[in-house]
Amino acid sequence: MTKEEMIAKTIQILADEFEVEKEEITPDADIKKTLDLDSLSLVDLVALIEETFDVKIKGTELMQAVTFSQLYDFLYERISSK
C-alpha cells in the first residue's frame, strides 16, 4: 500500500466514522478538534485504525500526533514495518 492510498483510506474511514466532511480532514488540521475526540471516541479511533490496517497501537502513541499529517506519518511507519 502506498502512502497516498493509506491517506485516502484513512480520510474515508475517519469521515464515515466521525461524521465529518472529507474536506475538513486536511494535513494541518488538529485531529482532536476536527473529529471532536474525547477519551471514549479516542478508543474508537484506535480500534478503527487497528482493524482497518491490521496493526496494534496504543492511544498514547496515537495522540502524540496532533495533526493529520503527523497521524499519516505514524500510521505509514507502522504499516510499513509489519
Image (cartoon, helix red, strand yellow):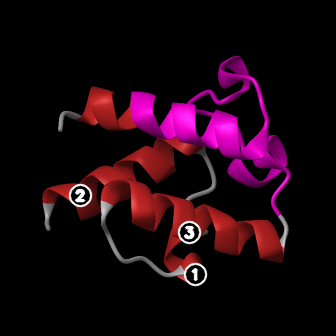
User: Image quadrant for the N terminus?
Assistant: top left
Label 3 – label 1 distance at C-alpha: 10 Å
Magenta stretch prevailing secondary structure: helix
Write the residue at 68% across / 18% down. 23
Query: Which is more toward the observer, 59 or 53?
Result: 53
Circle 2 sits in a helix, a strand or a loop, which is it? helix
Which span of residues is magenta-colored? 8-37
**Residue type at mark 1?**
Thr
Number of other residues with Cα within 10 Å of mark 3, as a class: few under 14, some 14 to 19, many 20 or more? many
Which picture quadrant has residue 81? bottom left
Look at 54% across and 69% down and name the residue there. Answer: 47
Secondary element at image label 1:
helix
Whether residue 23 can be seen here: yes
> Which numbered disc covers residue 60?
1
Kind of residue indicated by mark 2: Ile
Q: Earlier in the sequence, mark 2 or mark 3?
A: 3
Residue 23 numbered tag: none
Earlier sequence position, callout 1 versus callout 2: 1
Q: Which mark is residue 79?
A: 2
Q: Which residue is mark 3?
A: 46
The quarter of the image holding the C terminus is bottom left
| Residue 16 painted magenta | yes
The answer to which image quadrant residue 53 occupies is bottom left
